[in-house]
Amino acid sequence: METNQLNRRNFLSLLPAVSLTSFIQTPKAAAFPIAANVYNWMTFYTREGKPWGEDLDRNIGDVAKTGLKAFEPSFSDKNQALNYIAALKKHGIAMPSIYVGSILHEAEAIEKSIATILEIADVVKTYGTKIIVTNPNPQKGGVLKNDAQLVLQAQAMERLGSELRKKGLTLAYHTHDVELKAGAREFHHILLNTTPENVAFCFDVHWVYRGTENSQAAVFDVLKLYGKRIVELHVRQSVNGVWAETFTAEGDIDYRRLVRELSAMKIRPHVVIEQCLETKSPNTMNVVEAHTKDLEVVKETFKTLL
């Protein structure tokens, strides 16, 4: 599990501009096509013994075969962004959001991290990107951040979000499971010590579920606490604790209930498929077949929000 998470952290048309407030309160976020995150594709490619990223034209061509019209890549520098944009543009696939890693809890790393993200932002906004998702990197060895580091991180997130907002982009905070440890102190500190104007929320439903020791109650508590800040969902399903090969509305997480509650709250986020594989996941289809099925089921499940 940890290996997959760390790999993701490491590897890291135009739509009208809207403010974060209107983004949250109106249905415009749902105008984005359903997307898939690159990490899913990496896990399937790995299982099939194929490299991801050496031939982006072929990789994004596979994405296009599924019917997906949007994609969420991960970038560590502007050159990666330029390469992806060329491939996505060729295949007619939008990039409403991107994922970028960051180090925001170490004073000596903050300036470089923010500068890199702002440089990437200047590139991706030319291709219609409106949301930049970041999950501040954890410390090595599973050591949790101390209070001083959490304060520093929240201040940096607020500053980064403010700078992105000036560029017409929204910063969205994302978590894996480590941020939910120790009473979810890192998770809550970020959202309680930043402003909704500068830091929105990318709700990765299954990481919240797993990070709270498989608690669906916690998933819906998080929705109640921070739902108004959600601009994006990462959706994944598991069955009996194991990531399914394709997304289903029925499983460990009640996604139909999630859709009902989002609808009642008038929240219509950008929906990103992140149905990844782990060791015990079923192995019955290839990446194109799986994502074709994912798209079909996600469209049906989230149709009232799209």
Image (cartoon, rainbow, N blue to C red):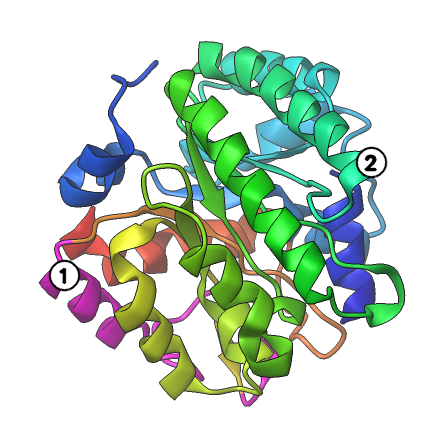
- For mark 1, what is the residue? 265
Residue at horizontal 47 percent and vertical 33 percent from the top: 161
Circle 2 SS class: helix
Instruction: Give, as a single range, the part of the protein colored magenta.
Output: 240-266
Query: Could you tell which of marks 2 and 1 lies nearer the N-terminus?
Result: 2
Residue 281's mark? none
Residue at horizontal 40 percent and vertical 71 percent from the top: 248
Q: Establish if 297 lies above or below 162.
A: below
Tell me how far mark 2 sits from mark 1, CA to CA: 40 Å
Q: Is residue 234 visible?
A: no
Instruction: Please tell me in which quadrant of the rendered image residue 114 appears.
Output: top right
User: Which numbered mark, 2 or 1, is in the foreground of this view?
Assistant: 2
Q: Badge 2, how many Cα within 10 Å: few under 14, some, many 20+?
A: few
Residue 245 belongs to magenta span: yes
Q: Amino acid at mark 2?
A: Glu
Residue 108's mark? 2
Residue 257 belongs to magenta span: yes
Q: Amino acid at mark 1?
A: Met
Q: Would you say 288 lies left or right of 66 here?
A: right
Q: Would you say 219 lies left or right of 182 here?
A: left
Q: Would you say 111 lies left or right of 119 here?
A: right
User: Which of the pair 291/111 is nearer the observer?
Assistant: 111
* Place of residue 153 in the rendered image (x, y in percent of width and height, measured from the top left): 63, 49
User: Which of the pair 228/72 is nearer the observer?
Assistant: 228
Residue at horizontal 15 percent and vertical 43 percent from the top: 25
Circle 1 SS class: loop
